[in-house]
């Protein structure tokens, strides 16, 4: 099922000389195929421009997919990027897809994971100003994420990043490692989870690349996503752990600067679909 607008597909089909006609359905057919849920039949927009109408459309497409997932009509959602400036104009009250999906399904313990063939990285915090991150790095939160990772990947070896340079250097550069992160790792170990750390973030990803660890738990957005995107940008996939459905997404943004030029790389989208199918199976 494609949740979108027939007018948008038609516009880009003509602009880029691509096949764009999909059968429009109001209910999910039993016959396998690709179908369009025509959520907003006619959409007013300008190519590559932020607007409230595009924000409303993004929010509407997402809500429609979630409604079908909540009623069991679909088992997975693969999201393409939202433009956060545009969707904010539509009164979207969440930092991003992940938080909206967690709220929609009533899930409190969830996590964003970005993965490619080389790395799996889970984020403790996601879309936050950097100054707010330290107050969110708490023992109970770290432990929750370790339990969630182990549930998704039983028996995996999980490396935990420190928050501060050199993982705090014994308290010299910060005490979050001593007071919050290390106690969570120890408690996780006691429950049988293969958790290790906290380790300095500037070396732990090399250790994961050499297969010493299966998953890395990073403390904040850029700490975790820079290594993933450096090692596999355009081929990495965003997976939300903890939801009752499968949700995957691409590793990039809306790229309004190249909209309508026919040069976008769909590699990450294809990988997101493949991973969603794999997880469903």
Image (spheres, rainbow, N blue to C red):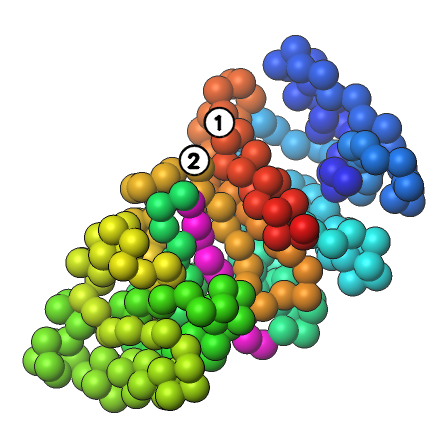
- Specify the label residue 265 is tagged with: 1
Q: Residue at x 50, y 50 (%)?
A: 238
Q: Residue at x 58, y 27 (%)?
A: 47
Can residue 94 be seen? Answer: no
Q: Which quadrant: the N terminus?
A: top right
Q: Residue at x 27, y 68 (%)?
A: 161
Residue 12 at x, y = what percent? 66, 21
Residue at far top of view: 17
Residue 114 at x, y = what percent? 44, 52
- The residue that disc 2 covers is 234
- Of callouts 2 and 1, the N-terminal one: 2
Q: Is residue 12 above or below residue 111?
A: above
- Residue 200 lies within the magenta run: no
Q: Which residues are magenta?
A: 108-116
Classify residue 140 as left or right of residue 160.
right
Can residue 277 be seen? Answer: yes
Graded by Cα atoms within 10 Å as few (under 14), some (14 to 19) or many (20 or more), the crowding at tag 2 reads some
- SS of the residue under disc 2: loop
Q: Residue at x 30, y 42 (%)?
A: 230
| C-beta proximity under 8 Å, tags 2 and 1 | yes
Residue 115 at x, y = what percent? 43, 50
Name the foreground residue: 277 vs 80: 277
């Amino acid at each position: 099922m494609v949740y979108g607008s027939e007018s948008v597909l038609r516009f880009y089909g003509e602009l880029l000389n691509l096949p764009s006609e999909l059968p429009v359905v109001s209910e999910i057919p039993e016959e396998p195929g690709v179908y369009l849920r025509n959520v907003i039949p006619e959409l007013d927009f300008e190519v590559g421009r932020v607007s409230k109408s595009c924000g409303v459309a993004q929010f509407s497409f997402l809500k429609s997919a979630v409604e079908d997932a909540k009623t069991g009509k679909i088992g997975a959602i693969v999201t393409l990027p939202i433009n956060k400036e545009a969707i904010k104009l539509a009164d979207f009250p969440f930092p991003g897809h992940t938080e909206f999906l967690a709220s929609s399904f009533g899930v409190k313990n969830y996590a964003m994971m970005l993965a490619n063939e080389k790395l799996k990285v889970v984020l403790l915090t996601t879309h936050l100003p950097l100054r707010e991150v330290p107050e969110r790095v708490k023992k109970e939160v770290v432990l929750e994420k370790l339990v969630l990772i182990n549930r998704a990947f039983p028996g995996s070896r999980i490396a935990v990043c420190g928050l501060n340079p050199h993982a705090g250097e014994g308290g010299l550069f910060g005490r979050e490692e001593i007071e919050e992160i290390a106690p969570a790792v120890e408690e996780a170990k006691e429950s049988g989870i293969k958790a290790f750390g906290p380790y300095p973030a500037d070396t732990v990803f090399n250790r994961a690349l050499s297969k010493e660890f299966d998953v890395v738990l990073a403390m904040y957005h850029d700490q975790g996503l820079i290594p993933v995107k450096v090692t596999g940008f355009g081929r990495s996939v965003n997976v939300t752990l903890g939801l009752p459905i499968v949700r995957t997404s691409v590793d990039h943004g809306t790229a309004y600067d190249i909209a309508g030029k026919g040069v976008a790389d769909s590699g990450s989208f294809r990988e997101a679909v493949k991973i969603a199918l794999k997880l469903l199976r």
